[in-house]
Image (cartoon, grey):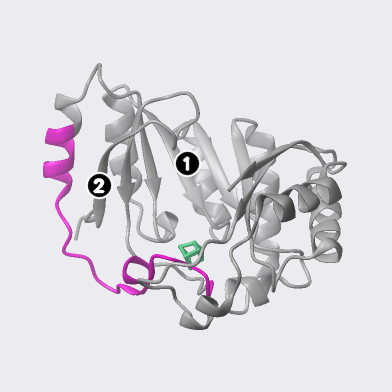
Amino acid sequence: MSMNIAGLQKVSTIDYPGEISCIVFLHGCNFRCGFCYNPDLVLREACEGFSQEYFFDFLKKRKGKLDAVCITGGEPLITLDLEFVKKIKELGFKVKIDTNGSFPDKLKELIDNKLIDYIAMDIKSSREFYARAAGIPVDISKIERSIKLVHDFKNSEFRTTIVKRFHDEKVMRELGKWVKKICGEKSSQIFLQGFRKNEEGMIDMDFLKEQNVSEKYLEEMREVIKNYFCEVGVRC
Ligand code: SF4
C-alpha cells in the first residue's frame, strides 16, 4: 500500500531555513518523549490521511510559489517512501527531512541518492541519559551513526528540546563532548529550543507539572555547550 500523508501545512516561512516551504506530516514514531506535544500523530498506528495524488496535485500548482517540502512526523523515516521523495525532487523542489536519528540506513540511502537538501536531527540528551529523554530504550549506536551522517552532510542542524528535569549543565556538557567526539571536530550548528507545555495533549501528561523553559535558562545551557559547536542558537 502506498504511503499516506497524515497532515499538510500548505505554507511555512520558518521551517526550511531561507526558503518558503510546505510541511508534510507522516504518522508514527518509535520514541515516546513524554513532552512530545503531538501524541495523536505519534501514537497513530495507521493513517487514512490523504493520498499522494492529492499532494502532488497541490504541489504542481505551487511551482514557482514554494521552494521546498519539509517532511516531518512523528518520525518520518519509519514510513517514508523513497519514490515519494524522488517525485518531489523531479518537480524541482528542495527537500528537508526531520529525524530522531533512529534510522541511519534509510537516512544514508536518501543522502546517497541525492534526495535531500537539508537535514534536521533531534539530539535528545547525552549518551548516558538518552533513553530517559526518549521515553524508551534506544539503540545508541544508530543515533551515533546518524549524528556522523548529519554532520558530514553539512547542510544540516541538530536540535535539542531543553526540559529542566532532563537537561542541566552536567548533561549538556556531556552531550556536547559526545557529539564533538563522534563528529571528530566541532559540529556546525545546534539549536536549543525550550520546552513548552501543551495543555491539549502530550505523550505523558505528567509534563503539565514541568516548568516552561525560560530564555535565561536556554542562554545558560548555550554557554555550557558553546565550545563544542561552531554555532549554538536558541529558540524560545
Ligand atoms: S518528540 Fe519524540 S515522540 Fe514526539 S515525534 Fe519527536 S521523537 Fe517522536
For image coordinates 59% across by 30% down, the residue present is: 155
Q: Is residue 47 magenta?
A: yes
Image quarter in which the N terminus is found: bottom left
For image coordinates 44% across by 59% down, the residue present is: 75
Where in the figure is residue 108, as x and y percent of width and height?
A: 55, 45
**Would you name the residue on which mark 1 appears?**
110
The reply to whether residue 161 is visible in this rendering is yes
In the rendered structure, the answer to whether residue 105 lies left or right of residue 143 reads left
Where in the figure is residue 24, as x and y percent of width and height?
A: 31, 46
Other residues around mark 1 within 10 Å, as few (<14) / some (14–19) / many (≥20):
some
Please give the range of residues in magenta.
Answer: 33-58
**Would you name the residue on which mark 2 appears?**
8
For image coordinates 15% across by 34% down, the residue present is: 58
- Residue type for callout 1: Leu
Residue placed most toward the observer, 53 or 157: 157
Residue placed most toward the observer, 207 or 4: 207
In the rendered structure, the answer to whether residue 162 lies left or right of residue 34 reads right
Q: Is residue 202 magenta?
A: no
Where in the figure is residue 19, as x and y percent of width and height?
A: 42, 24
**Dot 2: element:** strand
Quadrant of res 70: top left
